[in-house]
Image (cartoon, rainbow, N blue to C red):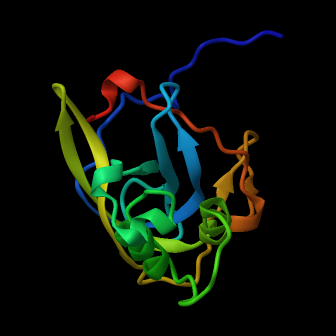
């Protein structure tokens, strides 16, 4: 194998500006950091079928397990996560009201491929600025035509034909608790 370095496609990292972005949910489900902190992770992509800046950028959203003393009865029904946050995501993604799930990962599978508006804000912790989702709203463009690029720069299909996802977990020292 032979290749040369080229920086035509390379860019400096730029913090995603605050604002509202039309997104598609790529994956959602329970996960844990190497230190054992559990969370419900949602990976979104900024849609390229809607006129907006920063198309194809990924946004990662985490709903952390609440401390036992802070959990409501509804929180306990969803494994200790914020029931309110999970239901806000489900409602705005268009999941049917009243549908029952055996696990959060089952709900995560239903979220996959759904479109939402993610309101993004900047958050500072330990001297670092990061992006986080403040809340979700219903999409203004429910007919999703987002396409994923493949390694050969051709297009793949939408929600059902996504490439495999890679989840990058934060270091425990970077967590706010």
Q: Quadrant of the C terminus?
A: top left
Q: Quadrant of the N terminus?
A: top right
Residue 41 visible in image: yes
Identity of the residue furthest to the bottom in this view: 97
119 left or right, relative to 166: left
> What residue do we see at 62% from left, 85% from top?
99
33 left or right, relative to 67: right
74 or 35: which is nearer to us?
74
Compared with 69, 126 (above or below) is above
Image quadrant where residue 138 sits: bottom left
> What residue do we see at 41% from left, 65% from top?
75
174 or 82: which is nearer to us?
82
How far from the left and from the top, in percent, is residue 15? 29, 39
54 or 59: which is nearer to us?
59
How far from the left and from the top, in percent, is residue 56? 51, 53
Compared with 120, 72 (above or below) is below
Image quadrant where residue 134 sits: bottom left
- Number of numbered discs present? 0
Residue 50 visible in image: no
How far from the left and from the top, in percent, is residue 22? 42, 69
59 left or right, relative to 15: right
70 left or right, relative to 101: left
> What residue do we see at 64% from left, 59% from top?
105
176 or 25: which is nearer to us?
176
Image quadrant where residue 128 sits: top left
């Amino acid at each position: 194998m032979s290749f040369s370095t080229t920086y035509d496609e390379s860019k400096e990292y730029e913090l995603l500006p605050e604002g509202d972005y039309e997104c598609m949910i790529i994956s959602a489900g329970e996960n844990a950091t190497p230190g054992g902190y559990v969370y419900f992770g949602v990976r979104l992509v900024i849609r390229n079928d809607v006129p907006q800046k920063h198309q194809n950028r990924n946004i990662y959203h985490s709903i952390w397990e609440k401390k036992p003393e802070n959990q409501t009865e509804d929180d306990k029904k969803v494994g200790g996560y914020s029931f309110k946050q999970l239901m806000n995501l489900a409602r705005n993604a268009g999941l049917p009201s009243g549908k029952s799930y055996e696990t959060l990962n089952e709900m995560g599978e239903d979220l996959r491929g759904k479109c939402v508006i993610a309101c993004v804000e900047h958050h500072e912790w330990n001297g670092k600025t990061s992006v986080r989702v403040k809340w979700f709203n219903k999409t203004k463009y429910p007919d999703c035509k987002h396409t994923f690029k493949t390694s050969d720069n051709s297009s793949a299909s939408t929600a059902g034909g996504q490439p495999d996802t890679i989840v990058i977990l934060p270091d425990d020292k970077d967590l706010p608790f």
